Amino acid sequence: MGLKTNKIIVILTGAGISAESGLNTFRGPDGLWENHRLEDVATMDAYLKDPQLVWRFYSMRRIQAANADPNAAHKALASFAFEQSSHFDTYLISQNVDVLHQRADIHNRLDPICMHGSLHQTRCMGCEAVYFDDYAYFDLSGNYAPQETTLCNADQKASASYLHHYKLEYRNFLPISPCCKQPLRPHIVWFGEHPMYMEKIIPIVQKANIFVTIGTSGVVYPAAGFLEMAKINGAHTVCINQEMIPQSSLIDEFIQGNAGEKVSEFLESLSKSS
Ligand code: APR
């Protein structure tokens, strides 16, 4: 008798899954980019032109993310990955940088692939070394006031790559890397830069039996192309979102509504069917 193999479920999340945690989405009426001109805060040019503005923006996002809590959708994904591990191999790919998936992953079974980086990491502009760094360097009103947030967990704070084990130097109120004494930038993918971990993501999407998008508008590539890639390779495709997305013709199952309610309902029905 052949070994029963697990079904592979691949989930792609976007800003919509964190909306009920109080974090702005990007293209909604209160869209994050609408508060800030895109080219003012999320590009290398912006950083080179005004690194303090960019660090004020990401400090504000670190404080916001630290003050938010994982919602029912984040928790349902983490529970499913843990409880259904004998029936499903669960892979989570996220476009979000808010660390809410990681904070919900109390059983350490989700291990999200964060293709746009993460608010709790910072990178050396000299050698590209990545540090855990949950400091907000400016307060919400934009004044220089370094403060620790809760974005890093105990293991990350204990690791050698936690930036604040080193006597941090600053230049014009901005952190300088302990390795190269070069400026440190947020470890976030900026517009015009390549998403991270694509060599890991593509094979995962191609082997999905079930591919689910949650809370993403499906307009930013390459993430917006994953649904078609999964479909071509035979996956059953599901979209959980407040509104239909452009890839509607490729979606086998569209579940309209709020992620906080619909994700756990969907995962429960999936668990029952396994
Ligand atoms: N439940 C489910 N869906 C929701 C909810 C909710 N509570 N709130 C909003 N949505 C949906 C919206 O209808 C929208 O389709 O989530 C989607 C959010 O879309 P975007 O704001 O475009 O965010 P996202 O798709 O993650 O953007 C992708 O674009 O700007 C870049 O790097 C940025 O990672 C981001 C990428």
Image (spheres, rainbow, N blue to C red):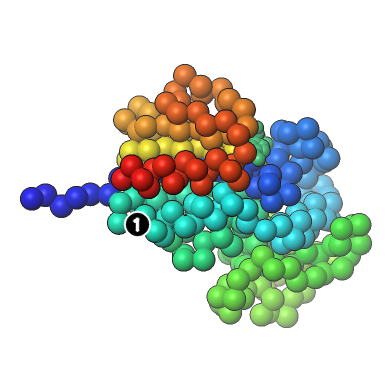
Could you say which is closer to the camera, residue 170 or residue 113? 113
Residue 21 lies, in percent from the top left, at: 69, 51
User: Callout 1: few (<14), some (14-19), or many (20+) C-alpha neighbours within 10 Å?
Assistant: some
Q: Is residue 45 visible?
A: no
Q: Image quadrant of residue 220?
A: top right
Secondary structure at badge 1 equals loop
**In the rendered image of this protein, does residue 172 appear above or below residue 1?**
below
**In the rendered image of this protein, does residue 223 appear above or below residue 77?**
above
Residue 84 lies, in percent from the top left, at: 36, 55
Along the horizontal axis of the image, is 54 left or right of 186? right
Quadrant for ligand 1?
top right
**In the rendered image of this protein, does residue 176 appear above or below residue 43?**
below
Tell me the kind of residue under disc 1: Ser
User: Could you tell me which residue is drawn at 45 percent across and 45 percent down?
Assistant: 267
So how many labels did they put on this image? Answer: 1
- Which residue is label 1 attached to? 85
Q: Image quadrant of residue 138?
A: bottom right
User: Could you tell me which residue is drawn at 58 percent across and 79 percent down?
Assistant: 158
**In the rendered image of this protein, does residue 58 appear above or below residue 239?**
below
Residue 130 lies, in percent from the top left, at: 59, 63
Q: Quadrant of the C terminus?
A: top left
Along the horizontal axis of the image, is 258 left or right of 65? left
User: Could you tell me which residue is drawn at 73 percent across and 49 percent down?
Assistant: 22
Residue 244 lies, in percent from the top left, at: 58, 25
Could you say which is closer to the camera, residue 242 or residue 46? 242
Could you say which is closer to the camera, residue 96 or residue 18? 18
Could you say which is closer to the camera, residue 27 or residue 225? 27
Q: Is residue 164 visible?
A: yes
- Work out which residue is located at the far top of the displayed protein and give it: 249
User: Could you tell me which residue is drawn at 49 percent across and 52 percent down?
Assistant: 77
Along the horizontal axis of the image, is 253 left or right of 22? left
Instruction: Look at the numbered disc 1 and say if its residue's Cβ is closer than 8 Å to ligand 1.
Output: no
